[in-house]
Amino acid sequence: MPMNTITEPELAWQETALCAQAGPEFFFPAPGSSTREAKQLCGACEGRVACLEYALANDERFGVWGGLSEKERLRMRRDQARGRG
Ligand code: SF4
């Protein structure tokens, strides 16, 4: 979930970020609470792929980014690392 308003070209996806209109509690839920609503919003977001790539590239640890929770992103990074090795 983008938290700033940097307008560099690689951050253009933030202009269509649906989460900018939603409350942060969707994307940074309390531990153990559901991320379902955030993921649903991500599913309808035009910038989902770019958002996920940004989160992976910048090692974003907290919250839902690009439709994936931190645990799911961690799993994806591990799978990618295994694939390379
Ligand atoms: S994919 Fe989800 S977290 Fe990323 S910008 Fe869109 S709504 Fe926000």
Image (cartoon, grey):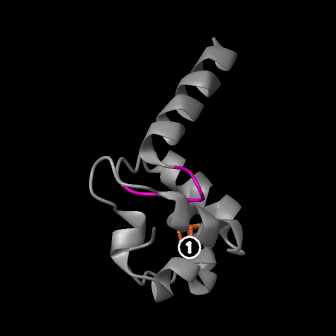
Residue at x 69%, y 66% (from the top left corner): 43
Task: Tell me the element at label 1.
Answer: helix
> For this view, does 46 lie left or right of residue 30?
right
- Report the amino acid beneath label 1: Leu
Residue 7's place in the image compared with 69, above or below, is below
Residue at x 32%, y 47% (from the top left corner): 32
Is any part of residue 8 visible from this angle? no
22 and 46: which is toward the camera: 22
Is any part of residue 41 visible from this angle? yes
Please state the horizontal and vertical placement of residue 3, each as a whole percent of the image. Answer: 37, 75
Residue 76's place in the image compared with 7, above or below, is above
Query: How would you rate the neighbour count of disc 1 (Cα within 10 Å): few for under 14, some for 14-19, many for 20 or more?
Result: some
| Furthest-left residue in this view | 30
Residue 16's place in the image compared with 54, above or below, is below
| Furthest-top residue in this view | 85
Query: Where is mark 1, residue-wise?
Result: 11
Q: What's drawn in magenta, residue-wise? A: 63-68
Q: Which quadrant of the render holds ligand 1? A: bottom right
Q: Dominant secondary structure of the magenta stretch?
A: loop
> For this view, does 71 lie left or right of residue 11?
left
Asked whether residue 65 is drawn in magenta, I would say: yes
Residue at x 53%, y 39% (from the top left corner): 72
Please state the horizontal and vertical placement of residue 61, each as a whole percent of the image. Answer: 36, 47
6 and 83: which is toward the camera: 83
Please state the horizontal and vertical placement of residue 85, each as a whole percent of the image. Answer: 63, 11
Residue 41's place in the image compared with 57, above or below, is below
Residue at x 45%, y 67% (from the top left corner): 1
Asked whether residue 43 is drawn in magenta, I would say: no
